[in-house]
Image (spheres, rainbow, N blue to C red):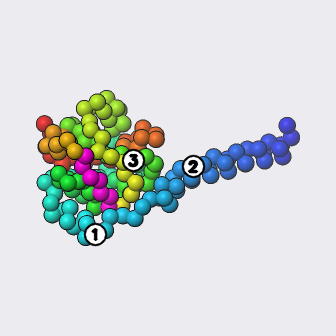
Amino acid sequence: MPIRAMTLTVSHLLALVVGIALGIYLLPILSQPAPAPESTLAGLRTQAEYQGEFRRDLEDSDLLHWGEGTLYLSDRGITLEGELAPGPAYRLYLSPNFIETEEAFLQNRHTMVDVGGISVFRNFMLTLPDGIELDRYTTAIVWCESFDQFITAAQYRPGL
């Protein structure tokens, strides 16, 4: 194969890979709904029974997988006043143990409850499904289902 043809093939493949990676990163940002209105967040904050902090400095959080802000939890729902790194197929789980690594998440997943999907990366709100008792858990975890990737966690109660 001539050098020119090989160079063109490699450059086109590289452009394709970069385009797909940018699409995976940007599509959730471009397609996310509007964040929760401040008035709604304020109402949920005042009703919160628990609160925890998402931090960027957790063991498996990194440049592309992080969250920061205050998480408020009540029988009505869970809301974040803060921000998550954008990504596809995020879900919020409640765990009876503090988790900050992918390995620990996968090992303990059977003890957790899935609260719901997160489609907004700033100031999200989730309705708490019927039957979930917040006091049975200690930690809220954001997990990326598409890539089995730990994003962040917030402990809202001391360990059981």
Where disc 2 sits, the SS reads helix
Indicate the amino acid at tag 1.
Glu
**Closer to us: 148 or 89:** 89
- Residue found 15% across the figure and 63% down from its top: 46
- Residue found 40% across the figure and 54% down from its top: 119
Image quadrant containing the N terminus:
top right
Where disc 1 sits, the SS reads helix
**Magenta span includes 70:** no
Residue 24 location (% of width, % of height): 53, 50
Indicate the amino acid at tag 3.
Tyr
Mark 3 or 1, nearer chain start: 1
Task: Report the magenta residues as a range.
Answer: 123-129
**Closer to us: 25 or 89:** 89
Alpha-carbon span between mark 2 and mark 3: 17 Å
Mark 2 or 1, nearer chain start: 2
- Residue found 83% across the figure and 44% down from its top: 5
The residue wearing badge 1 is 38
Q: In this view, does 150 lie to the left or right of 48?
A: right
Indicate the amino acid at tag 2.
Ala
Residue 75 circle label? none
Residue 104 location (% of width, % of height): 31, 33
The residue wearing badge 2 is 21
Alpha-carbon span between mark 2 and mark 1: 33 Å
**Magenta span includes 124:** yes
Alpha-carbon span between mark 3 and mark 1: 22 Å
* Contact flag, marks 3 and 1 (Cβ < 8 Å): no
